[in-house]
Image (cartoon, rainbow, N blue to C red):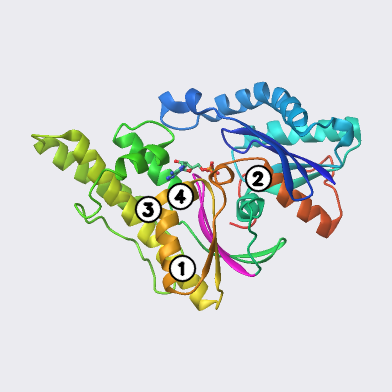
Amino acid sequence: MFILGIESSCDDTAVAVLEDDAVLANVVSSQDSIHERFGGVVPELASRNHLLAMQPLIRSALHQAMLTLQDINLIAVTQGPGLIGSLLVGYSYAKALSYVTKIPFIGVDHMAGHLFSVFLGKKSPPFPFIALIVSGGTSSIYLCESFTSFTLLGRTRDDAAGEAFDKVAKLLDLGYPGGPSVSRYAARGDAKRFSFPRAWLDKDSYDFSFSGLKTAVLQTYKKHHRDLQGDNDQLTSDICASFQQAVIDVLVQKTITAAQKNTIQTVVLGGGVAANKQLREKMAEQCRVHDMSLFLPDPVYCTDNAAMIAFAGYHKYKKINIANDFDTDVFSRSIYN
Ligand code: KG4
């Protein structure tokens, strides 16, 4: 089966073509340069630019896959969660394409895409597994038993991990998106210089909270920047390293505890923050210590992409064998979140 995947939940427009589980084409048009000067995504600009990018990207993906629209058997499209205006562009496009071509279309939860992005790599994890999904919009831990059965164990109570990276980057004036630049600075910094708070929350809770950490970073920066005699670059690097360490410590420990408590031996990562090298290394180290297997998606499948949407859509369709109706709509909040 050939599947056309469409993703437009936030600021990246993405299209992919899969033949069953195999990726034939995966193209992304980033809007980072458009939103950078605002330090975050401007929803109206995101929707308008999805409209501009969609048609050329679909052409380009089909061309790369050496297929035409007539070859496609299923259209899989992100239905939510995300920015409503952005989602509407991709979802309406998929509906229109489906109406004209008679190809069935299926709505996919963006979280399911992130959960299964690891299957696009060389080695697939066995079910059941514990998944940590960390992106700009979510920080969640799931118990995943099949392609269509996953239970939310914990989620962020305020900022998502990626959002915390982006906000810290904004406050240190490191540009948008913040994750990659904060981690670049962190690589040169001393993670022990500042002891930032780790929010463990209630005993046995798998929830996260990063807003206090963000405030601590702000106060530390203000204090030290004011007294600064020497190297601002070193201060920025040390803050980034200490902040990153605080985020990673909590993410890793809660994930490992969730796996232990549910007697699961397999751990999976997903979402944009899963591209973070330190997080990948620390999770790998802790999985080794606890005799667990870790499966990491390729970094291109960590950030938003349509290959993961096509994959999740394909498996959902195989299971339920029902296409979406034309009167269905997008949703802003995940049903799994
Ligand atoms: O999954 P994604 O592309 O979009 C959402 O669904 O949100 O994730 C984007 C998020 C941004 O917050 C970005 O700062 C973060 O992932 N990110 C990183 C890294 N690369 C991207 N965070 C930490 N370290 C990275 N290397």
Tell me which secondary structure the magenta stretch mostly adopts.
strand
Give the number of the disc on residue 210: 3
The disc at residue 160 is 4
Task: Say which residue label 1 marks.
Answer: 287
User: Mark 3–mark 4 contact, CB under 8 Å?
Assistant: yes
Which quadrant holds the C terminus?
bottom right
Question: Which of marks 1 and 2 precedes in the sequence?
Answer: 2
Q: Secondary structure at mark 1?
A: helix
Beta carbon at label 4 within 8 Å of ligand 1: yes
Q: Name the residue furthest front.
A: 122
User: Between marks 3 and 4, how big is the CA–CA gap?
Assistant: 7 Å
Residue of label 2:
80
| Mark closer to the chain start, 1 or 3 | 3
- Spatial separation of the CA atoms under disc 3 and disc 2: 24 Å
| Label 2 with label 1: CB-CB less than 8 Å | no
What is the CA distance from the residue labelled 1 to the residue labelled 3?
A: 23 Å
